Image (tube, rainbow, N blue to C red):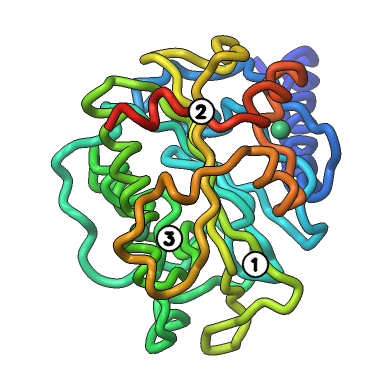
Amino acid sequence: MANKKTLSRNAAIGLVLVLLGVQIFTQCNKKNQQQTPSEQPTPGSNGASNATGTIHLEMGIPTGGDGEPAYLLKRKQYALSYNGTKNVPNWVSSNLNASYFGDTERKQGQFMPDPDLPPQFYKVRHQDYSNTGFDRGHMVRSEERTASREDNDATFYTTNLLPQYHDLNAGPWLRLEEFCQFLSVRKKKELYIICGGIFPKNYQTIGKRNNVAVPSHCFKIIVVLESGQKVNDVNENTTVLAAIMPNVEGIKSEQWRQYQTTVDEIEQRTGYDFLTAVPKKIQDAIESRKSTSLAMAQ
Ligand code: MN
Ligand code: MN
């Protein structure tokens, strides 16, 4: 039944796929790129309906950045922008609610090179972090993907890592992660999280090829909505938590709230515009203030 109609339809589908590929490769450095939240699956169903990972970009693809080669990587468990010069993610974006938590045990063994990176990107290995003094700092936390073996394993790709000092990783960074777990599991909130690193001009590097960049700070943005809510539910009163924490030793006993800041501050220090799918007027409101109400809830 390969008539003219189906042939041209197949050609059209092929063209769309090629264009999609081109768009992914040129994601880096595009200004004002808007994410259309058209094919969003339902949040709360972290499984099969979210095979493409689009739910993790519900708040929009961040625009701007440092201009270095970047690759937009989407998978079922999270989405990220990978930096081909620094060999770390520029940002990692993820949806979180109670359904992502299960009883799958933490993956045993090594972190894995990411098979979904294109060949021109260096694939960071577990050993690049060995004996460097830095932790392999998860961006999407292992505990936040425990509904299935596959989900948890996906947090162990090295594209989901930043070099973090242990005192940050096991200190205020962990406490903010625990607060996210409290909000999603106990308070049944719908969270949209974006996190990553901030890099000075002369950043430190680690690794066998000395090509893995060490951030001076790590940032985290958390949009707090009610269960099942999406970007269209964000308004000027939406709780947005933001933090910038120094990647240093000696802060293990600090509280995360000490590092609370505004999204505006993170945007200024990273060069990214975040929450790009939120109307500009609402962005202006929620990005310029520190939400306090929920921060007191713990
Ligand atoms: Mn960690
Ligand atoms: Mn913004």
Q: Position of residue 256 (x, y in %)?
A: 40, 49
Q: Residue at x 52, y 73 (%)?
A: 124
Q: Determine which residue is flagged by label 2.
A: 291
Viewed as shown, does residue 174 lie left or right of 28?
left
Q: For the residues marked 2 and 1, what is the alpha-carbon distance in whole angstroms?
A: 42 Å
Q: Camera-side residue: 167 or 53?
A: 167
Q: Position of residue 114 (x, y in %)?
A: 49, 62
Secondary element type, mark 1? loop
Q: Residues within 10 Å of mark 3 (few under 14, many from 20)?
A: many
Viewed as shown, does residue 3 lie left or right of 212?
right
What type is the residue that disc 1 sits on?
A: Pro
What type is the residue that disc 2 sits on?
A: Ser
Residue 157's disc number: 3
* Ligand 1 quadrant assignment: bottom left
Mark 3 CB in 8 Å range of ligand 1? no
Residue 284's disc number: none
Label 3 close to label 2 by CB (< 8 Å): no
Residue 119's disc number: 1
Q: Quadrant of residue 46?
A: top left
Secondary element type, mark 3? loop
What type is the residue that disc 3 sits on?
A: Tyr
Q: Position of residue 178 (x, y in %)?
A: 29, 44
